[in-house]
Amino acid sequence: MSTLQPTVPTPAALPKLRPVAWLRPLLKHPSGAFGFFGVMFFILLSFVGPLVIPPTKANPSNQYLAPSPTNILGTDNQGKDIFTQIVYGGAPVITVALIAGLIKTAVAITLGALAAYLGGVVDRVINGVANFILTIPYLVAVTVLASFIRLNSPVLLAFLIAAFAWPVLMRTVRAQVLSLREREYIEAARALNLGTFHIIFREILPNMASYIAISMILAMTNAIYAQIALITLGLVPFSDQNWGIMIFKARTLGAINTARTAMYILAPVLAIALFQWSLVTLARSIEDVFNPRLRTGA
């Protein structure tokens, strides 16, 4: 995690990039290029693929077929094509991760900035709430909630994941803002009486752009792990196909016990791992987009 901590540039160093120009520093390094194209591949596969690839149908006579040109990843216990299930199963996972990442990042950044800048009672209340949430056992709480709430909505699941995930990021943002609020340009903004909202959201947070972008990407990776774990444990009864349900079904059917059925569980695991790897490598190159000194090699 320490390798992903960005430096905070001064206001004069903030980049003004054209809509396409930001791709150049991002793709400058092989890791950034692989991460970017990897993320784009899974997004296109998951959201465009279902528009051109028809859904798979059960065919018991094709049960557990080995990979072939017809079924490039083989078939499952019902004779359904595994690759088609990978195509249709990506969108729900990515959607939940994106919504949860946005909620977590927005809440953590807003509360962390307010706690650091305002201090006093506001700081103590926000830190008290964060400390309380950190003491709650996550899986136990979700298990209890699942007995009262049917977690079959991607949006509801995203809110639940974000609700338990923001305190750690909030503490880090608070530490960053505590440092930034002592800068001369913040003192000048106070002297001009620009207002708390303007100072936080127009002066402080823009200087944390690279950190916010990296935090958003890492929040998505954590949300993917969280939802897959909940689905695999059977706590999220989704009716739609997704990678987590594929793992859950394959595990309950014992697909990992023999080589003949291993692809049924390995395919979604590899899809999740490759998408996670793409997100992490993309995050490692994000700072080049926002820090001109890194782009120029200074």
Image: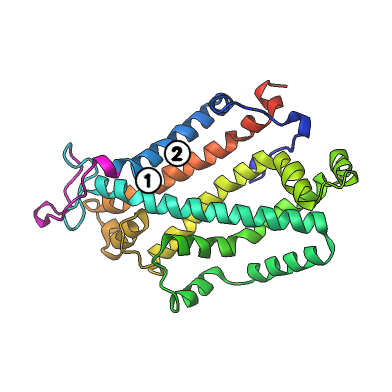
| Residue 120, quarter of picture | bottom right
Name above or below for residue 248 compared with residue 87.
below
Label 1 with label 2: CB-CB less than 8 Å: no
Q: Which of 37 and 267 is in front in this view?
A: 37
Q: What stretch is highlighted in magenta?
A: 50-68
Name above or below for residue 27 compared with residue 257.
above
Q: Which of 117 and 87 is in front in this view?
A: 117
Per the image, the residue denoted by label 1 is: 271
Tell me if residue 3 can be seen: no
Kindly state the secondary structure of the residue where label 1 is placed. helix
Given the current orientation, which residue lies at the most extreme left position? 61
Q: Is residue 38 left or right of residue 203?
A: left
Q: Which of 254 and 241 is in front in this view?
A: 241
**Residue at image x 48%, y 53%?**
97
- How busy is the neighbourhood of tag 1: few (under 14 within 10 Å), some, or many (20 plus)? some
| Residue 166, quarter of picture | bottom right
Tell me if residue 138 can be seen: yes
Per the image, the residue denoted by label 2 is: 39
Q: Residue 13 at x, y = what percent?
A: 74, 29
Name above or below for residue 202 compared with residue 153.
above
Amino acid, disc 2 = Val
* Label 1, label 2: how far apart the Cα atoms are: 11 Å
Magenta-span inclusion, residue 55: yes
Given the current orientation, which residue lies at the most extreme right position? 191
Amino acid, disc 1 = Ala
**Residue at image x 71%, y 52%?**
172
